[in-house]
Image (tube, coloured by chain):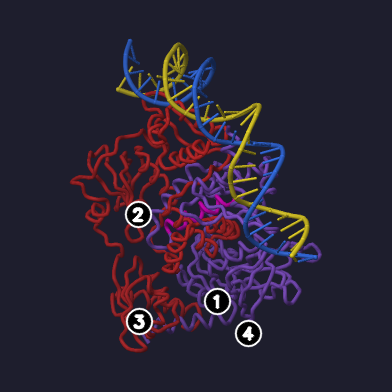
Chain colours: A red, B purple, C yellow, D blue
Amino acid sequence: MLQTSARLLRLLSLLQIRREWSGSDLADRLEVDVRTVRRDVDKLRNLGYPVNATTGSAGGYRLGAGAALPPLLLDDDEAVAVAVSLRTATSGPIAGIEDTSLRALTKLEQVLPSRLRRRVNALQSYTVPIPLRPGPTVDAAVLTTIASACRDSERLRFDYADHNGVESLRVVEPHSMANWGRRWYLVAWDVDRADWRTFRVDRVSPRTPTGPRFTPRELPNGVDVATFVSSRITAAPWRSRARILMHASAEALSDRFGGYGRLEPVDENTCVFETGADSFESLALYLGMTGVDFEVQEPPELVEHIRELSRRYARASGSE
Amino acid sequence: MLQTSARLLRLLSLLQIRREWSGSDLADRLEVDVRTVRRDVDKLRNLGYPVNATTGSAGGYRLGAGAALPPLLLDDDEAVAVAVSLRTATSGPIAGIEDTSLRALTKLEQVLPSRLRRRVNALQSYTVPIPLRPGPTVDAAVLTTIASACRDSERLRFDYADHNGVESLRVVEPHSMANWGRRWYLVAWDVDRADWRTFRVDRVSPRTPTGPRFTPRELPNGVDVATFVSSRITAAPWRSRARILMHASAEALSDRFGGYGRLEPVDENTCVFETGADSFESLALYLGMTGVDFEVQEPPELVEHIRELSRRYARASGSE
DNA sequence: AGCGTTGAGGACAGGAGTTGTCCGCGAGGG
DNA sequence: CCCTCGCGGACAACTCCTGTCCTCAACGCT
């Protein structure tokens, strides 16, 4: 009977890992007869977890959204990600869910294996509060839509605005996603153009529903995703680089700046901060936040932005 | 049949809700004999989930951190909190876990009941990126330590720095936590002082291990926590209020400012922004971020900070 | 030190549930 | 039209679960 319960859990876990499973696949994985799989699926349904099934040659089982949330079966990495996210959320920018986040976090941390707890702490300590989130933000709903399409090998239809703002409807077989700098990219086989393409996720507007399933294909020449994406992306993660002379010691600034660039000491009271930015406005403000005097060495555009800010603040405080 | 598996899941869920359970409590909840509970606990252990037990009159079962992560059984609110946290994390400030967060999020959203999905979307749309997190930040580890002590009715020992910075060792029976503005407060019965006290969590340094269990007591006069805390806190959630005349329409600003104060239209191109802040530095920077001209109406201290910023930027850009 | 409480676990008998096998049915896609 | 895949009834062999009853072993309190 242990076997039965354990198998039910494993079944639930399998259904959470991949969207669609055929009965015989499940039977293989669970090392039981297909008939038993059917019975197990029935059990899950009786427990209130809706397992949808489709018949026919492309049939299979998939776990649907039901009345109650099934137990979440996370792997190590995912558990760490959840813990870290919750930790930032409890002290984070979203009003109203702090208490609940904390409750969920307590639940999770109680059972978190110690090796994972170490990883959570390590990751957390690298966390640097970002003062501004410049550039286009990616919609979380779009991200998850694409991510599930990748995971389940389902065709994706979406409107895509290219860098000139021209819209086009794309039908692709999504391969994977990669994030680079602050951006997300989708690597996919463009069905109409019959070629591999890289799309910026912030320019994608998915259309529902997602299309039929396809058999995944390999990237050309067996390259991995990271290489593929970076070879396709012309833009660097940051639009430009900057060098700023800070009138403070490197140690004093390392907490706030360490995560965002290189701090090179010049002498006891001065250091050079090398960093990159998508937008000079945000970088200018970030620098102002420190309460420390600084001199921009490059680029000139940053100097211009800072001059503009200086003027605006002067106007605002009536000292012009 | 189903009963056995379902009961194992419920047992796991119970053990996640509260830390410590006596065998007979569990037997009551699960409506089986204590002997069966013992056997079920054994089953969980065989499945790899460590259930620690202590004998004696204060004995009981508790779920420990094991080699593998047990299935997480979240209630509705917690699931929403996790989803929202993960969504912000995927586009968030922590480098290196975006992919994994996304994977976990995909898993969760696939099984998220639609009513919960609506709540997640609603919450998400209220999200306003906060440019700066002023004031002392609360350590997530401290938060969870206190939260579990509250949940499990375990005494807590910690060092507390009062507002003068004087440290003292406290032994308390934690009652609950509340957050107010950006702050967290712990409401607890101070054992040595034999009275109720309210502590600011950012000034608490817990000592390990937590103490023995205690029987929870009611707050005096049956008041609820929120009332109790707000009656004890002299400081408002914001240290001071500000009024700023913005040279832009209220609609144009509502996205960025809506969550942080009241926007009152004056005319088509002007509006008044009323808000609060813990620190004028951050407010000044937040205002500068908009790219919109503004005039501070009050308080005078904010004007002074803006003047200071103006000077610093002027120096940085060499236009002084 | 003694007592009560709480968990651990062996033994046992009856009963409940599970499993694989074999079968025919129905739905969907090529 | 046929193939694939999910559905579910029947059945026999077998597993293992459950409640009851028992004795031990820790632990805390008096």
The quadrant of the image that shows the N terminus of chain B is top right
Q: Respond whether the residues carrying marks 4 and 3 are from the same subunit.
A: yes
Residue on which disc 3 sits: B317
Discs 1/2, front: 2
Gap in Å between the C-alphas at discs 4 and 1?
Answer: 19 Å
- Mark 3 belongs to chain: B
Instruction: Using the image, determine if residue B212 lies above or below residue B7.
Output: below
Q: Which mark is on residue B164?
A: 4
- Mark 1 belongs to chain: B
Report if residue B291 is visible in the image. Answer: no
**Residue shown at the point (60%, 64%) measured from the top left:** B262
Q: Dot 3 surroundings within 10 Å: few (below 14), some, or many (20 or more)? A: many
Task: Tell me the element at label 1.
Answer: loop
Instruction: Using the image, determine if residue A229 lies above or below residue B283.
Output: above
Sequence-wise first label, 4 or 1 = 4
**Residue shown at the point (61%, 61%) measured from the top left:** B148
Image location of residue B42, percent across then percent down: 56, 46
Task: Tell me the element at label 3.
Answer: loop
Residue type at numbered disc 2: Trp
Discs 4/3, front: 4
Residue on which disc 2 sits: A184
Residue type at numbered disc 1: Ser
Gap in Å between the C-alphas at discs 1 and 2?
Answer: 34 Å
Q: Dot 2 surroundings within 10 Å: few (below 14), some, or many (20 or more)? A: many
Q: Nearer the viewer, residue A274 or B197?
A: B197
Image location of residue B312, percent across then percent down: 42, 83
Counting labels gives: 4
**Residue shown at the point (51%, 47%) measured from the top left:** B71
Residue on which disc 1 sits: B279
Q: Nearer the viewer, residue B211 or A264?
A: B211
